[in-house]
Image: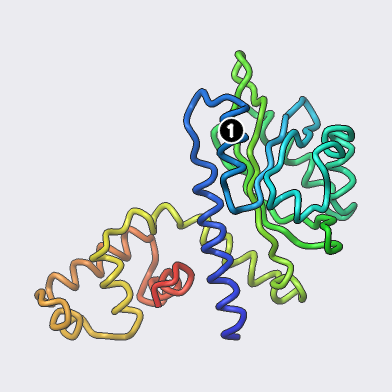
């Protein structure tokens, strides 16, 4: 169990790092985008979106190494290369992604999904997040950036898969709330989940127990949980424990 938790912690840190890659300036050019992607240690690819299809136009070294492919091959095959590396059981995700970003309401959103990809080491589960980066004059998406990591070690059984999806969904849905917490709130949250009472926390932090109670109440409201058990889940998945 501890091994699974440690793997999940490491993965969630990668996912957080992936999200950072998807922060880029407005009005960025394709060449500038390629430079940013190449500088990332994560697996990053740039895709060109058409009406119902998309094709890979560039990858960084990490992605090329993972896929075991050359730039010439991805450019030559276009959308056929996407169909080639996606397992047929997972192919619906390809069309869901294209449909998602052809909806104008989703053009500033991130599409995250698990994929079963053919890599240089055989078939592997990967987790990716894809976001539009460059748009046509009419506002439609032209280029997207995708960043991902292998999650193959965590997908060996159906139980692991379900646990992963549940925990990762929680992580993604609550990341912004976590990032809104102050350092003091994180400190108090950690102590709460270590089962210290308000008076014990107050003594450790040299504040009044009433202040601790206020922080506890504010945390429950901010994180939208019902009790200390809900707070403990934040500590576990955001690596505070």
The residue drawn where x is 53% and y is 26% is: 28
Q: Residues within 10 Å of mark 1 (few under 14, many from 20)?
A: some
Q: Is residue 55 above or below residue 11?
A: above
Task: Please give the name of the residue rendered at 56% of the width and 30% of the height, measured from the top-left corner.
Answer: 32
Residue 6 lies, in percent from the top left, at 56, 77
Q: Nearer the viewer, residue 92 or 70?
A: 70
Can you say which quadrant of the picture contains the C terminus?
Answer: bottom left
**How many numbered discs, if any?**
1
Q: Regarding mark 1 in the picture, which secondary structure is present there? A: helix
Kindly indicate the quadrant of the structure image that contains residue 159: bottom right
19 over 100 or under it: above or below: below
Quarter of the figure that contains the N terminus = bottom right
Instruction: Please state if 189 lies on the left or on the right of 65 as rendered.
Output: left
Please name the residue shown 61% across and 23% down the image. 135
Q: What percent of the width, then of the height, locates residue 23?
A: 49, 40
Colour basis: rainbow
In this view, which residue lies farthest toward the top?
Answer: 137
Return the residue at label 1.
33
Q: Quadrant of residue 83?
A: top right
Query: Image check: 8 left or right of 175?
Result: right
Residue 150, image x, y percentages: 70, 62
Left or right: 7 with respect to 240?
A: right
50 and 72: which one is in front? 72
Residue at 85% of width from left, 33% of height from top? 78
Residue 19 at x, y = what percent? 53, 49
Classify 172 as above or below 98: below
């Amino acid at each position: 169990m501890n091994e699974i938790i440690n793997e999940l912690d490491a993965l969630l840190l990668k996912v957080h790092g992936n999200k950072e890659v998807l922060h880029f300036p407005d009005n960025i050019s394709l060449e500038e985008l390629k430079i940013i992607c190449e500088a990332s240690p994560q697996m990053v690819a740039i895709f060109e979106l058409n009406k119902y299809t998309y094709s890979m136009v560039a990858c960084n070294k990490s992605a090329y190494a993972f896929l075991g492919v050359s730039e010439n091959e991805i450019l030559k095959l276009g959308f056929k290369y996407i169909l080639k590396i996606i397992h047929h059981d997972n192919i619906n995700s390809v069309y869901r992604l294209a449909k998602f970003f052809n909806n104008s309401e989703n053009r500033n959103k991130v599409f995250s999904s698990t994929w079963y990809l053919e890599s240089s080491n055989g078939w592997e589960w990967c987790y990716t997040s894809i976001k539009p980066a460059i748009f046509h004059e009419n506002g439609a998406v032209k280029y997207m950036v995708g960043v991902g990591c292998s999650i193959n070690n965590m997908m060996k059984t159906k139980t692991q898969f379900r646990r992963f999806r549940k925990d990762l969904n929680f992580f993604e849905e609550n990341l912004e709330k976590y990032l809104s917490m102050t350092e003091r709130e994180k400190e108090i949250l950690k102590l709460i989940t270590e089962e210290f009472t308000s008076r014990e926390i107050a003594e450790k932090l040299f504040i009044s127990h009433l202040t601790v109670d206020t922080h506890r109440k504010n945390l429950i409201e901010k994180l939208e949980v019902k009790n200390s058990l809900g707070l403990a889940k934040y500590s576990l998945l955001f690596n505070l424990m």
